[in-house]
Image (cartoon, helix red, strand yellow):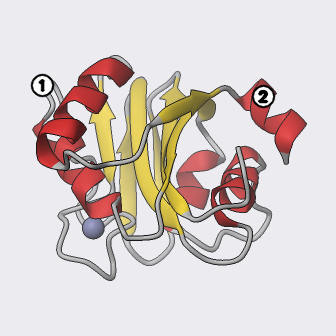
């Protein structure tokens, strides 16, 4: 994982039912399952710096995801290098995948037209399914790779 601009999806595992206050946005009713959060990192440090941020627990939450991150386990990060905003297209693909739901409207999507950048799945979605759907939507999209938190710890 390099310090290049790009788009990423966090695969977070929640193990128990609980309520999380997400700043001023509202309350998130967390269910056991997989939470997928989509973002982009086009600034300095790129994907590596941002994923490094998400791999640790924020003492002072800044983004909506920082609140959920405290109570969920990071399982994988999917990412690609790209200097244009792809996170809305990624969010749209997750929104159309079977079994998904939107746990809290507006989560991570304060500045865009997406209903949310957070999606819930009873089980973690498959990367090959996502890649196939992404290619069908954006044929020239760059490669999407996957890393585990263990690999991230070595890189950041
Ligand atoms: Zn969006």
Circle 1 residues within 10 Å: few <14, some 14–19, many ≥20: few
Residue placed under numbered mark 2 in the picture: 151
Indicate whether 105 appears above or below 56: below
**Is 86 left, or right, of 15 in this rendering?**
left
Give residue 146's position: percent from left, percent from top: 55, 29
Give residue 82's position: percent from left, percent from top: 46, 60
First in residue order: circle 2 vs circle 1: 1
Extreme residue toward the bottom, this view: 111
Q: Nearer the viewer, mark 2 or mark 1?
A: 2
The residue located at (62%, 77%) in the rendering is 43
Give residue 64's mark. none
Indicate whether 61 appears above or below 116: below
Question: What is the count of numbered marks?
Answer: 2
Residue placed under numbered mark 1 in the picture: 98
Closer-to-camera residue (37/19): 37
> Mark 2 falls on what kind of element?
helix
Closer-to-camera residue (82/66): 82
Give residue 41's position: percent from left, percent from top: 56, 66
Indicate whether 124 appears above or below 149: above
Quadrant of ligand 1: it is bottom left
**Is 76 left, or right, of 18 in this rendering?**
right
**Is 43 left, or right, of 6 in this rendering?**
right
């Amino acid at each position: 994982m390099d310090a290049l601009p790009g788009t990423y999806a966090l695969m977070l595992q929640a193990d128990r039912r609980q309520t999380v206050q997400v700043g001023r946005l509202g309350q998130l009713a967390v269910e056991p399952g997989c939470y997928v959060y989509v973002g982009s990192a086009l600034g300095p440090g790129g994907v590596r710096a941002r994923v490094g941020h998400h791999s640790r627990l924020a003492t002072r939450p800044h983004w909506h995801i920082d609140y959920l991150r405290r109570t969920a386990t990071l399982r994988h990060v999917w990412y690609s290098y790209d200097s244009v905003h792809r996170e809305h297209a990624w969010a749209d693909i997750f929104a159309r995948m079977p079994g998904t739901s939107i746990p809290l409207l507006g989560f991570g999507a304060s500045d865009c037209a997406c209903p949310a950048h957070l999606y819930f799945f009873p089980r973690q979605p498959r990367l090959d399914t996502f890649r196939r759907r992404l290619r069908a939507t954006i044929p020239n999209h760059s490669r999407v790779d996957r890393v585990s938190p263990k690999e991230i710890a070595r890189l950041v």
